[in-house]
Image (cartoon, grey):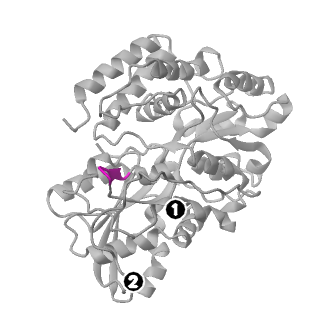
Amino acid sequence: MPHLSRRGALRLTAGLALGAALPLAGCGRDDGTAAAGTVKKVDASPATGTVDVWAAQGDADVLDKVVKPFKAANPDLVVKTTLIPNAEYYTKLQAAIAAGKGPDVAQFFPESQAQFLDSSTLQPVPDGLVDPDSFFESLWDAGVVGDVAYTVPWYAYTYALVYRSDLARKAGVEAPTTWDQMTPFLKALQSAGATRGLGADIGWDIFNGQDIAMYAWQAGGSLVSSAGKWTLNTPEMVDALKYNASFFTAGTADTSGPTFLDAQPYFVSGRTASMITGPWVVGQLDTAAKKDGWTASHVATAPLPAGASGSVSFSAGGTWGVLANSDNADASWKLVRHLAKPSTQVAQYKAYGSLPAVIFAWDDSAIKGQPLLGAFFTQLKNTRAFPQVSTWQQVATRLGKETEAVAKGKQTAAKAAANIQAYAESVGTGAE
């Protein structure tokens, strides 16, 4: 199933610059973490020949600019980049791979790349190519199957709470840190003038499914057991569905709006006062307000409120992999290594606003000085990868639909959890 990009189409983060230092800290890895792979190491000699690169339009639009130093350092290498509309990308990539006509290097999305993580499709990441510990842990782990890594992280994002700081100041409240504090916070924003406290997602689709998965983790649940079985009909999933529905039943969110495209105008106008969303939104709010500096004086961010098991969110972004039948694997991996360098990821941020997957790149002054990014950095250190099963997108889409019935009071959370478990078992995990 192709990567769905209803949100990705709007990840234009130019103008993220907004002030104060980010607290930086390493993200450790347990000794049992999977090794990068077992293939031949890639040396430091110049890359030569031709490398065909496929990527989805969006963050990759500036790829030629970002790889320009690599091309200059490797004059005998030709890099051919093909950009494909995001919504069509996986479909075309899958067709090309099936026909034996895929590129050398392809972009993937950690939240939806599971179906490609196999040695018949991708080459294992060579030993020593990159340091797994240099990336946010869940982003690296999203590309690891059976102790073999198949992808290298490129850029990162996750969800955090974006809210109207001016209304919070007026109401005398601070950002919530727990589920129990969320509704009182949202109601306080309404008392300060907002029509609704939260601009909730009402697409009732795969993105709602991802939200519920995130809440289930916060409640202490899992999605797939260690034995590879779906674990969706659980008390934690019921709690997640109830938590999401509480935004609507409490009157702090509306099942009729805003739609995704209306989210920022609603937020700027005060029809809503918060969003649970990704970092790309921050750089778009001045445009929505039609006023430079509006964001700096009206907006704040915070990590997600914690459930019984913490404030965990999901990891997403972009990764790179080298196809199994690449004719120039050596040069391909050298290009991927370049794209994984902190300096390259900082250049990608400057060119497009893509947030680095390499932790230490966040220490660069171009990123470190952005106050509204601090919450996303904090949250990225507490994220999980979605299940590495080929049917996850189907299950997440169905989960999003079940969420609608609960939010609108047409179905109990317990019934929805039972329904999604039954559906997930019917489609399996793709591993049977």
Q: Is residue 346 above or below residue 381?
A: below
Q: Residue at x 70, y 38 (%)?
A: 163
Relative to 383, is 185 on the left or the right? Answer: right
Q: Is residue 115 above or below residue 427?
A: below
Q: Is residue 50 above or below residue 56?
A: below
- Which numbered tag is attached to residue 134? 1
Q: Is residue 9 above or below residue 390?
A: below
Q: Position of residue 127 (x, y in %)?
A: 35, 68
Specify few, some or many for label 2: CA neighbours under 10 Å numbering under 14, 14-19, or 20 or more: few
Q: Would residue 317 be visible to someone looking at this image?
A: no
Structural distance between the alpha carbons of marks 1 and 2: 20 Å
**Which span of residues is magenta-colored?**
143-147
Pointer 2 residue: 44
Q: Position of residue 137 (x, y in %)?
A: 49, 52
Under mark 2, the amino acid is Ala
Q: Residue at x 46, y 10 (%)?
A: 412
Tell me the quarter of the image containing the C terminus.
top left
